[in-house]
Amino acid sequence: MAGYDLVAIGAGHAGNEAALASARLGVATALVTINLDEIGKMPCNPAIGGPGKSQIVREIDALGGGMGLIADSTMINIRLLNTSKGKAMQVRRAQCDRHAYKTAWKRLLEGTDGLDLIEGTVEEILVSDHRVVGVRLREGKTLAARAVVVATGTFLNGRVLIGKTSYPAGRSGAPPAVGLAASLHRLGLRMERLNTGTTPRVNRNSIDYSGLPRQDTSDVPLGFSFWRKPRVLPKDHPVYVTHTNPETHRIIRENLHLSPNYNGLIAGEGPRHCPSLETKIVKFPERGSHKVFLEPEGRETAEVYLQGIYTAFPPEIQERIVHSIEGLEHARIERYGYDIEYDYVAPRQLSPSLEVDGIGGLYLAGQINGTTGYEEAAGQGLIAGINAARSVLGQGPFVLSRGEAFIGVMIDDLVTKGITEPYRMLPSRAEYRITLRESNADLRLARIGHELGLISDAQYEQVEKRRKQIEEILQELRITRVGPRDPVNERLIACGTSPLDQNGASLYELLRRPQVRLSDLLDRSDIPDDVETEVEIEAKYSGYLAQQAREIAHLKKMEGIPIPDDLDYDALTNISIEGRELLARVRPRSFGQAARIPGISQADLSMLAILLRR
């Protein structure tokens, strides 16, 4: 029997990050996947980043993960979003070359010491005395393991649906994982169904771009990784924008009975924040049109992804829908859109380390936990891989709090609140999103990554150098006062803000004005762009940041009140029956987590606090 310290199942975004982190932490790791040629595949859209997601990518990068570096090396278009908002709200979104992306992932994993790649199908997770001991492959091989990370995406009892047709599949062209789903069920895990969809792909040469707005890549260097110098991309792969119209909507309404979303074929809940086109037409009948983004899929392919047309209509209806849209009147569909329904494990059965309650060494990451999106999967994979490796090494679990990272918010939401639909990370889910912005992920998390052993000394020194520059400039701004005769006054007037009076002001106070930039106050060419951005955010959002710092300190205090793992909630008769049931179902690790359980009353929390103090 071959033996490893850790086995990761599935080579999508979650499994790759888990295996990479584990091997880099010195743990003998195997990554098992049904097809080695599909490692790191982007089965849906060719994009990385966007609101709520870019923050996760930057956090993964700051902790030593691979997604940011891989995206930077393979992207063909990148833009800054939310540019009409303040700098703290701005995020990156990139179009990647799908083939180059998965090739880069395979190259990285193949070159990682202590990591073996194995093509095979896991049929069973082996458990003895409530602890993982290995996995059994369909090919007849058994791999001993002290920890297992399951990152199977949409493959558990997966089923593809197009019109009235359905067939077993993990995604189009790939077989489902039936045996593994049965194995998880036998282990006592509660499993439910979800569904998600993808869009038609059309041939670029059949699109009429002449009347469509064009979105070129950024004119300034942009990237996700803190460890690679950003670059300006050639403007040879723009994104174009078109819209659905009343004719599109008429076709959809008249044929709803042919869509699996409305003909009764689908049992699982679909995504609310990224719904099918037919769902948008039904739920928003007042809307005359919906945006459609024409996203290139790579340098070596003519395929274009129709972002916004998630649909599973029969092929002939998909063709009518596509041809009704401006610019796509003669578009040739190369791949039809489809829905996929699959099993997931209800995530409240997990601890915040993503370990399954009651089965030591078994960790779950990605869509198996009910999430949707590459970035959400990768963030979970990194945390699961770190914790699985730490369990092998005899170290305690690593958990990010809601006050430290978007990844912490996501995992806390999953294990505390559970889900009723595919979970997507949105900025609105993060209470401290101004503090947890994408631009300062390295300042927040690189120290942790260094302590874990995933960030090198040189990388950490790079971050500390940036932190020192920011602090020195902020201090200079605070101690430098100017008056009405200072040349700065003329620049203030030129910026459209009021001039100084006789009392004067510090440069820091002036920078807090919305119209003023750091370059208006300090005539220096030695300040890097990323340092300038952080200085301006720290000044302009100082009130919000101070308030959130106080709230995060309070959160940390609440998280520091532990709840014993073996606490008998049924014996807490001073707490309501409903409260006891909720607490017993989630089994919170801290008072802070208990306070976030949906439905728990303030009266029950007050009584729990009294009991914990006793």
Image (spheres, rainbow, N blue to C red):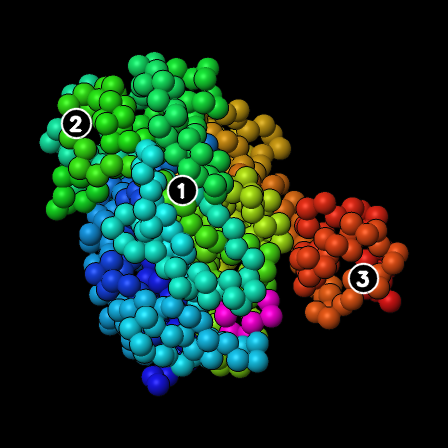
Give above or below for 414 relative to 181: above
Quadrant of the drawing holding the N terminus: bottom left
Residue 460: percent from left, percent from top: 41, 67
Residue 339 visible within the image: yes
Q: Is tag 1's residue or tag 2's residue first in the polypeptide sequence?
A: 1
Q: Earlier in the sequence, mark 1 or mark 3?
A: 1
Q: Report the residue at 65% width, 45% height from top.
A: 547
Describe the element under mark 3 as helix, strand or loop. Answer: helix
Which amino acid type is shown beneath numbered disc 2?
Ala
Foreground residue among 27 and 363: 363
Q: Which secondary structure dominates the residues rendered in magenta? A: loop
The residue pinned by badge 3 equals 570
Q: At 38% across and 51% down in the image, what residue appears?
A: 158
Give x and y (percent) for residue 334: 17, 37
Crowding near the residue tagged with mark 2, few <14, some 14–19, many ≥20 C-alpha atoms within 10 Å: some
In the drawing, what numbered circle is on residue 331?
A: 2
| Disc 2 secondary structure class | loop
Which stretch appears magenta? Answer: 357-363
Cβ atoms under marks 1 and 2 closer than 8 Å: no
Q: Position of residue 537 (x, y in %)?
A: 49, 43
Residue type pointed to by label 1: Thr
Q: Residue furthest bottom?
A: 1
From the image, tell me which residue sits under label 1. Answer: 196
**371 displayed left or right of 163:** right
Image-based side of 440 in relation to 551, left or right: left
- Give me the C-alpha separation between circle 2 and circle 3: 63 Å
